[in-house]
Image (cartoon, rainbow, N blue to C red):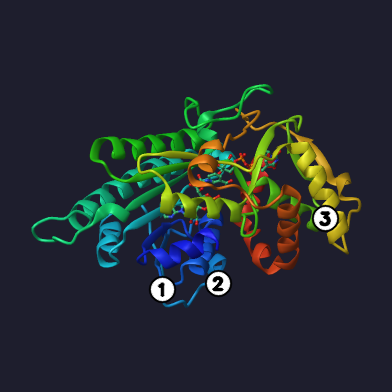
Amino acid sequence: MTFSQQQTLSREPRRLLVTGGAGFIGSNFVHHWCKQYPGDRVVVLDALTYAGNRNNLTYVEGRENLRFVHGDICDRPLIDTLLGEEMIDTVAHFAAESHVDRSILGPDAFIRTNVVGTFTLLEAFRHHWKRQGQPTSNNPSGDGSTYRFLHVSTDEVYGSLGPDDPPFTETTPYAPNSPYSASKAGSDHLARAYYETYGLPTIITNCSNNYGPYHFPEKLIPLMCINILLGKSLPVYGDGQNVRDWLYVGDHCGALDVVIHRGQPGGTYNIGGNNEVKNINLVHTLCELMNELAPHLSVRPSQKLITFVKDRPGHDRRYAIDATKIQAELGWTPAETLEGGLRQTLEWYLTHRDWWQPLLSEEYQAYYRQVYA
Ligand code: NAD
Ligand code: DAU
């Protein structure tokens, strides 16, 4: 019996607020949750920024237990209303500005959403939890023991590793290097402080680089896939020797499921795939796989498209996650191999041109010119 099947049999339905549920990881998480726990209520709150996309939720749209709300996590009255009327007991907080290059071009939105937005959610959830999740004379059956605030964060808060440094653990000091990672670090500190100060059952996860379906074209793997298909150059920053630790998004969602059900309130869990790869090697692998999978490439072999370009300012050299804690405490390990996950991902991009083509809008082209000109 899988972990999710055991949970379904042994617990009351949960009522989730999923922020950023129309983004890449959030939408994969909504698919995961609706499939595993069809009896749970799932309310998606998403501002539909450039990175949010209603089409990411097509497969679950129309389900009785799913509600989509177009709104902003900084909108406190809206959050208060949703928490109350939907009797939310679990917040899965994905909403964020998530792209490092955009944070370098314009950090403002990162501070607003990632810091102020997270603060707004924490404050609203704290009041809701006090009202509804505690036994009081007005609400004697109030039981907050299942209440959770899952704060989905990143390994980038730990900064950059040297080639021989051990991987990040949950006690590695924070040393964020980009406005994006600094804003995520700020939000992590708030989530932690709300547990320490108010006892709010927050849990923080710090995950490595994800890849898989519904990944917005600006990020390395989808960008390379799409550019190979379009016969456009493949821009590798700097010397291409930077290292990332890749995790299939479905595995990340499985880890978050386990953390929501069994994670320790006030705890932090690192999540990673044990797949450290240099960027240039990853791009070569993507080219090889695409040469094999795509029948009609205009440039073949696609490796001919690889171009080294100016480096990202403050570019972190290496990330690597030590996921021993989540494995030992909660029994989670990733199921997908890197090669298997990349194959599935490339096949998805090959068969979902109707999903990604409209995202290459004039606005996206303007962004692209700014970063790669
Ligand atoms: P994404 O950019 O694909 O999606 C972000 C979503 O948040 C979008 O749907 C967007 O519309 C929504 N959003 C943005 N601002 C909002 C606001 N003010 N109010 C409501 N919704 C808003 O991001 P992602 O890659 O899916 O990342 C999700 C979370 O996971 C982020 O918190 C990110 O820091 C974290 N994370 C990402 C990765 C990764 O590799 N992508 C790895 C580790 C952690
Ligand atoms: O580590 C987790 C983080 O992973 C998440 O918190 C972020 O939200 C997510 O965007 C991702 O950040 P990275 O900066 O690592 O991902 P990105 O896909 O932008 O880049 C991966 C690596 O590839 C990085 O070393 C920069 C390089 N790169 C990226 C792009 C877009 C290139 O060489 N060329 C490119 O065009």
Amino acid of disc 3: Met
Q: Earlier in the sequence, mark 1 or mark 2?
A: 2
Question: Closer to the N terminus: mark 1 or mark 3?
Answer: 1
Q: Is residue 214 left or right of residue 197?
A: right
Q: Nearer the viewer, residue 65 or 255?
A: 255
The label shown at residue 5 is: none
Residue 25 in picture, x, y percent from top left: 54, 54
Residue at image mark 2? 58
* Local secondary structure at mark 1: loop
Looking at the image, do the residues carrying marks 1 and 3 touch, with CB atoms under 8 Å apart? Answer: no
Residue at 50 percent of width and 65 percent of height: 5
Which residue is the site of mark 1?
A: 65
Disc 3 is placed on an element classified as helix
Q: Which residue is mark 3?
A: 290
Compute the Cα span from label 1 to label 2: 14 Å
Quote the CA–CA distance across marks 2 and 3.
Answer: 26 Å
Q: Position of residue 358 (x, y in %)?
A: 64, 64
Residue at x-position 78% and y-position 43%: 283
Question: Do the numbered discs 1 and 2 sit on residues whose CB atoms are within 8 Å?
Answer: no
Is any atom of residue 34 visible in this view?
A: yes
